[in-house]
Image (cartoon, rainbow, N blue to C red):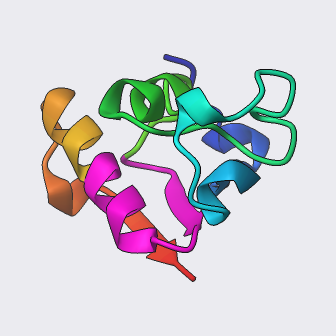
Amino acid sequence: MHDISGAGAITLSMISCNSVYRGFDIDEVAPLLLGTCGTTIYTVDDMELCLKEFPLETTSVRSNDPLPFTMQCVLLAVTKRQGDPWSAISCTAN
């Protein structure tokens, strides 16, 4: 993992793929449309891959999602999987 905080990056804004806003399942969307207007995060594995290069203890994660609490639960699951305490993360939602 690279510490990018020295480069000034302290907040990561996560915007979900527009298909989520429209209520589609990932299998119902044409592959060419997936990820064109946001990140496709449907599982804890997806979130872990998105956060792979970001040290959660020094990066605030902002979730721009119609279901921000769902995204934050996935973030908590990634944190638990990595063995970090929940108190080490910072996140906001709108």
Q: Residue furthest front?
A: 28
Q: Residue at x 13, y 49 (%)?
A: 85
Q: Position of residue 24 (x, y in %)?
A: 58, 49
Query: What span is in magenta?
Result: 57-75
In the image, taking residue 4 as reference, residue 93 lies left or right, namely left
Residue 59: within the magenta?
yes
Q: Position of residue 80 (x, y in %)?
A: 14, 39
- Looking at the picture, does residue 36 appear above or below residue 93? above
In the image, taking residue 78 as reference, residue 91 lies left or right, namely right
Q: Residue at x 56, y 59 (%)?
A: 23
Q: Residue furthest top?
A: 1
Q: Quadrant of residue 42?
A: top left
In the image, taking residue 1 as reference, residue 84 lies left or right, namely left
Q: Residue at x 84, y 33 (%)?
A: 33
Q: Position of residue 18 (x, y in %)?
A: 74, 55
- Looking at the picture, does residue 6 appear above or below residue 88? above
Residue 76: within the magenta?
no
